[in-house]
Image: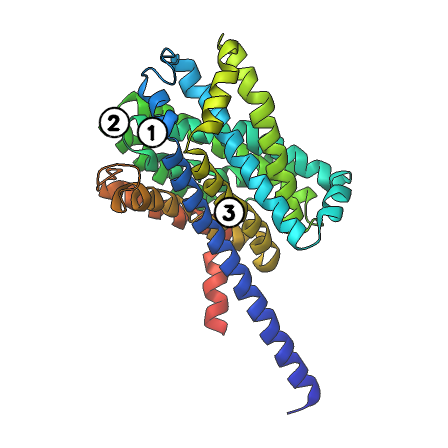
Amino acid sequence: MGMDQRVAELREERRRKYFVRGIAFAIASGICYGMYTGTLTLAETQGVWGEWFAGTEWGAGNPPLSPFVITFVLAALAAGLNDIFSGIWSLAVCAKNRQLGDFWKTVKTKPGLIMIACAAIGGPIATICYIVALNSATAAGNPGVIVPIAALNCAIGAVLGRVFFKQELNAHKIVGILICLLAAAIIGGTSFAAMGPEAMLGCLFAFIAAFGWGFEGCVAGFGTILIDYRIGIAIRQVTAGVLELFIMFPLLAVIGGEATCIPELAGAAFSSPALWIFVVSGFFAMPAYSFWYKGNSMCGAALGMACNGMYAFWGPFFIWLIMGALNIGGMAADFPPLEPIQWIGALIMVVGIFCIAVDPANLFGKKKEA
């Protein structure tokens, strides 16, 4: 065996291991997103949060909150808490890797500013809508059903990439989009028939969240390739948390005519034992995004998106595992009561996402050649 051939083999082996590690990161990001969804849903059922959503008196005899506050203001508060803690975790990781100096320098650069813009799209818009959807579906008795709807961000991102950035929309992407829409129709239609208008409200806001994340993905792909994934997620989560907690939360309270309740709500949220669950949800939100960035850079954005998009299944699974099977938070063992058709719809969504990201013909063609 010649030296050149041996070097080529070693280089190919290293490339293969690097590629496999990228897939592992992308899959881990989807699992972490499922854990983030499960723990966040749990947090909003505990302590004063349970009293708020139950529509009863809370604290020292405070009257029940209005429907607007319960639906939108609390969603902004929950999103802000989750993302602030996620940002703190992210900064801690940067500090551990001696990257805080690079963090502050990157914020001032063009890629850093684009990441801030992504956070503005994915935080105050997408994340708040996602939590509104979760809360609405939880009130209807089945929070897991909206997660696959939110996972449409991959399909929406492909369409928006074609509209705004003239990206190619191949046949396999169109097929994948149609599969995702079919899965969304199965899940949404079944949920509406079983649970009523609350489920429809949840599906609507989940779709808005998917649109926001799809647009965020388009923008981020063009502006963040030069940012280390740890620094990128720190910028995103800190920005999103600040915007949600200090701007959107009070702004929505003012819009709802409940400006006087801002200090009381914030004080009750920060003094509630459920705050520690938000710390945990923020911890999982950090790798959910950072592993996505890392995986995309190692195995390619298309395949990374497909592996991450498996949270269409992991989200409902971890809600069921944490709040149902493990009975954390006092829920029934069969919570949430997912129908078999809804689990099937979630798996169909994963197949659709995979078809959008990867051309099956090319993939199986390469395997056949190998």
Amino acid at circle 3? Ala
Residue situated in front as seen by the camera: 124 or 153: 124
Pointer 3 and pointer 1: residues touching (CB < 8 Å)? no
Q: Earlier in the sequence, mark 2 or mark 1?
A: 1
Residue 288 bears which disc, if any? 3
Residue denoted by label 2: 195
Pointer 2 and pointer 1: residues touching (CB < 8 Å)? yes
Between the residue at mark 3 and the residue at mark 1, the CA separation in whole angstroms equals 22 Å
Amino acid at circle 2? Met
Residue situated in front as seen by the camera: 285 or 61: 61
Q: Earlier in the sequence, mark 2 or mark 3?
A: 2
Between the residue at mark 2 and the residue at mark 3, the CA separation in whole angstroms equals 30 Å
Locate residue 233, reporting x and y percent: 61, 44
- The answer to whether residue 265 is left or right of residue 220 is left
Q: Earlier in the sequence, mark 3 or mark 1?
A: 1
Provide the secondary structure element on which disc 1 rests.
helix
Quick one: quadrant of the N terminus?
bottom right
Select label 2 or label 3 by which is in front.
3
Q: Among all residues in the image, which is located at the extreme top? A: 257
Between the residue at mark 2 and the residue at mark 1, the CA separation in whole angstroms equals 9 Å
Q: Among all residues in the image, which is located at the extreme front? A: 60
In the image, what residue occupies the spot 47% across and 54% down? Answer: 28
Mark 2 closeness class: few <14, some 14–19, many ≥20 residues within 10 Å:
some
Residue denoted by label 1: 137
Amino acid at circle 1? Ala
Whether residue 175 is visible here, answered yes or no, is: no
Provide the secondary structure element on which disc 3 rests.
helix
Q: Is residue 29 above or below residue 140?
A: below
Residue situated in front as seen by the camera: 308 or 252: 252
In the image, what residue occupies the spot 62% across and 36% down? Answer: 238
Residue 23 bears which disc, if any? none
